[in-house]
Image: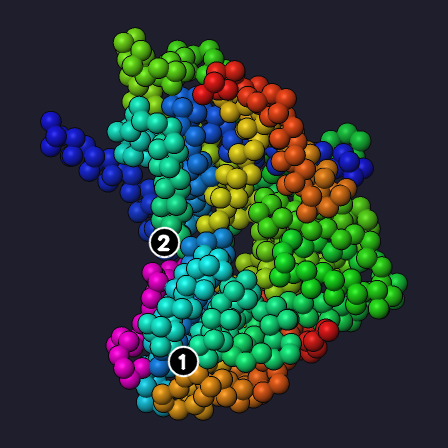
């Protein structure tokens, strides 16, 4: 397998990781107009929940996975109900500050509960996946790619085709007007956070299986995924996937051919260029620009 | 209505806490989890408090920042050692009180911590974890004539020896020497091709330049030299590029998660040669995850549960267990060893001990035999404020399911 093909394929798994984490930013932004800087720690907590069930309690992967995802969804919804519901309607900056505070508190809480040592997650994807032309991929990478594409496709359909998805958009666009239309803004917003938390859990589990979970992993994941969704458009699910793909591939090829020290710089130069040409990102709606 | 809301909020809070509570319970049953015996920012380590009759020791480490996975265990290593010392009657009849502050890996907080140790705690000596904190805080310590001793130390801080500044850990810029010797001893060819994959860090710039310089002196050719941002999610691309350059041996300076990512990719790409990592990514759990006979890490310290563990290691494990912490965590043994160095100096110094007297006492720590906690005797002197004299390479023994030394103790000469 050539180096270029190897990098291209390997970065697809990284792109899926970015997309799985980043789509939570998008869903919460679309559903509540909150830029959630706690998304990274939600992913980490999802991974930790899985660790508790799978590694500590010894439950099977196929039981632990859905339970961890559901637990993360419920946890995220409760975060909204407890800390953000009462702030409905306040200016966005204050909400952003709340999510930053949540991120700090949850990171500290995770450190106290789980300790600071790296936790390794074992998943039943240890083999290799053989494709034509002598292309070999780790099964874990393939699983992450498939999960990313399927989940983001499902999210995109859900947000645009389902009644609940439309209610989420209505609640975010104008909460008061949505209430007049008998949309329960709090319920819809809590559900939005639940969906974002569930998606983030998958990212956290995938990251934990690849590199292990430590208290700093939340920041690593969150800050890695954020430029991808800005690139793709902060209110676009397909944009999150495309942004993640473009960013991961650019970073991967830059690292391999120029050196890893240039990967972040080149990634952000690309981000700046695209934002100058199209301020709402590749797939973002123009409404975001006015905001 | 208000009462109902309050009750609802309490219920929500209770449910919110449930997953974490479950996690706490289950985490406690995990062998790889850590439960700290001393949380927060200050630890009494078994003494009755900071009474006037105690030795005061300061420790500035990362407890909540990006390197908390190293800082927490290091604190526990210090605390478990001093708890044992205090239980045995203290030093010169005085208990040791450990004052711990969190610097979150930031120099600003590190400087503030050092100021607090000096002005409020009247410490005899200050321990630190990171080189960036040491560089920023050392002038404050020096101005106040208080010895500071760090695990991470740039070569420039101790060569030549600076008053009051001591290196307790390996100087990372000197690690290329034994790494190349080990690779050579393992049979790398005279014209070996070398790959380098390392995190991008000012503290590691000397590591990179010395590795390149020594490789060239040996007649080896560096065919790939990859640097990765500290915040990277994986080292896949860099490892792919390294594998395609077809080196004979790959030297790494990667933290544990990135090292795992790099080795897995290298093996997937068919690279079967020797991969050697620096001591910042030398956790036992990393060796266990990789269980690769051609992976080795450099360390100045032994491992809990290592094959053929010495009496010193057994004592370390016992102290950690008595303190209620997991002895296998990275950097815990570093903290334990540093505490032993400090205790040795305090014994010589007498009571009270501070300032120039403590510096003189540290300079008298000579050929300290830790029974295998440090793999080689530890020595400070008036002209040498860097005390690690030897390192060893460790791998994973699948047969024993434990870390195992894979080299003799090698000297670690200073590279100027």
Give the vertical position of B310 relative to A215 (above or below): below
By secondary structure, the bulk of the magenta-drawn segment is best described as: loop
Image point (76%, 68%), residue name: B180
Q: Which chain carries label 1?
A: B
Q: Dot 2, how many residues are within 10 Å of its Cα: few (below 14), some (14-19), or many (20+)? A: some
Left or right: B94 in relation to A120: left
**How is the protein colored in the picture?**
rainbow
Give the vertical position of B219 relative to B366 (above or below): above
Residue A56 in the image: x percent, y percent? 41, 50
Of residues A64 and A37, the one drawn nearer to the viewer in this rendering: A37
Image point (36%, 42%), residue name: A101
Image point (57%, 22%), residue name: A279
Left or right: A197 in relation to B243: left
Of residues A260 and B137, the one drawn nearer to the viewer in this rendering: B137
Left or right: B123 in relation to B168: left
Tell me where residue A64 sits by quadrant.
Answer: top left
Residue B196 in the image: x percent, y percent? 74, 56
Q: Which chain carries label 2?
A: A
Residue that carries the numbered disc 2 in the rendered image: A112
Tell me where residue A207 sits by quadrant.
Answer: top right
The image quadrant where one finds the C terminus of chain A is top left
The image quadrant where one finds the N terminus of chain A is top right
Instruction: Report the residue that reaches farthest toward the top.
Output: A181
Residue that carries the numbered disc 1 in the rendered image: B124
Of residues A158 and A170, the one drawn nearer to the viewer in this rendering: A170
- Name the secondary structure under disc 2: helix
- Magenta highlight range: B33-54
Residue B45 visible in this rendered orientation of the protein: no
Q: Is residue B20 magenta?
A: no
Dot in front, 2 or 1: 1
Residue B274 in the image: x percent, y percent? 74, 60
């Amino acid at each position: 397998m050539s180096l270029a093909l190897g990098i291209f394929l390997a970065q697809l798994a990284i792109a899926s990781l970015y997309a799985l984490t980043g789509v939570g930013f998008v869903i919460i932004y679309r559903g509540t107009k909150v830029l959630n800087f706690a998304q990274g720690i939600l992913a980490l907590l999802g991974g930790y929940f899985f660790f508790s069930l799978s590694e500590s309690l010894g439950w099977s992967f196929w039981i632990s996975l859905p339970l961890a995802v559901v637990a993360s969804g419920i946890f995220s919804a409760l975060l909204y109900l407890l800390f953000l519901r009462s702030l409905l309607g306040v200016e966005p900056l204050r909400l952003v500050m709340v999510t930053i505070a949540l991120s700090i508190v949850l990171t500290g809480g995770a450190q106290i509960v789980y300790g600071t040592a790296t936790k390794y997650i074992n998943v039943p994807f240890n083999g290799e996946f053989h494709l034509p032309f002598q292309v070999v991929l780790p099964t874990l990478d393939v699983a992450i790619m498939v999960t990313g594409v399927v989940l983001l496709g499902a999210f995109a359909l859900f947000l645009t085709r389902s009644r609940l998805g439309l209610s989420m958009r209505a609640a975010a666009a104008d909460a008061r007007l949505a209430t007049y239309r008998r949309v329960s803004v709090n319920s819809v917003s809590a559900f939005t956070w639940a969906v974002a938390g569930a998606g983030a859990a998958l990212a956290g589990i995938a990251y934990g299986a690849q590199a292990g979970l430590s208290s700093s992993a939340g920041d690593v994941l969150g800050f890695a995924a954020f430029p991808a969704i800005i690139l793709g458009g902060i209110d676009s699910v397909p944009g999150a996937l495309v942004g993640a793909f473009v960013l991961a591939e650019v970073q991967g090829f830059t690292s391999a051919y120029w050196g890893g020290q240039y990967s972040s710089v080149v990634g952000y130069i690309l981000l700046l260029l695209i934002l100058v040409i199209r301020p709402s990102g590749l797939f973002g709606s123009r409404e975001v620009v006015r905001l | 209505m208000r009462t109902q809301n309050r009750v609802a909020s309490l219920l929500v809070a209770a449910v919110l806490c449930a997953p974490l509570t479950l996690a706490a319970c289950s985490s406690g049953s995990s062998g790889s989890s850590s439960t700290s015996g001393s949380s927060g920012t200050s630890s009494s380590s078994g003494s009755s408090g900071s009474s006037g009759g105690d030795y005061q020791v300061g420790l500035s480490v990362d407890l909540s920042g990006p390197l908390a996975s190293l800082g927490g265990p290091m604190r526990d290593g210090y605390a478990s050692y001093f708890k044992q010392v205090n239980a045995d009657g203290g030093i010169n009849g005085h208990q040791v009180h450990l004052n711990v502050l969190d610097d979150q890996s930031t120099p600003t907080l590190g400087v503030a911590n050092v100021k607090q140790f000096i002005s409020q705690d009247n410490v005899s000596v200050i321990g630190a974890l990171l080189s960036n904190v040491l560089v920023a805080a050392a002038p404050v310590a020096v101005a106040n004539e208080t010895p500071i001793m760090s695990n991470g130390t740039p070569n420039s801080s101790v060569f030549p020896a600076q008053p009051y500044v001591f290196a307790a850990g390996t100087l990372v810029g000197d690690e290329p020497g034994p790494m190349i010797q080990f690779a050579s001893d393992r049979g790398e060819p005279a014209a070996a091709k070398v790959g380098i994959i390392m995190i991008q860090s000012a503290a590691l710039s000397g590591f990179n330049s010395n590795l390149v310089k020594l490789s060239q002196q040996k007649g080896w050719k560096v065919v790939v030299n990859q640097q990765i941002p500290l915040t990277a999610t994986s080292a896949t691309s860099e490892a792919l590029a390294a594998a395609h350059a077809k080196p004979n041996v790959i030297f790494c300076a990667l933290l544990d998660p990135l090292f795992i990512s790099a080795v897995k990719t290298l093996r997937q790409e068919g690279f079967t040669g020797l991969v050697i990592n620096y001591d910042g990514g030398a956790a036992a759990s990393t060796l266990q995850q990789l269980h690769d006979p051609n992976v080795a890490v450099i360390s100045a310290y032994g491992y809990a549960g290592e094959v053929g563990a010495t009496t010193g290691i057994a004592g370390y494990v016992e102290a950690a267990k008595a303190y209620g912490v997991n002895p296998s965590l990275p950097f815990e043994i570093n903290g334990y060893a540093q505490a032993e160095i400090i205790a040795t100096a305090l014994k010589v110094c007498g009571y009270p001990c501070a300032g120039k007297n403590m510096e003189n006492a540290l300079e008298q720590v000579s050929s300290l035999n830790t029974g295998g906690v440090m793999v080689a005797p530890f020595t400070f002197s008036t002209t040498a404020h860097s005390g690690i004299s030897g390192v060893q390479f460790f791998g994973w023994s699948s047969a024993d399911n434990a870390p195992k030394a894979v080299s003799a103790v090698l000297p670690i000469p200073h590279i100027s």
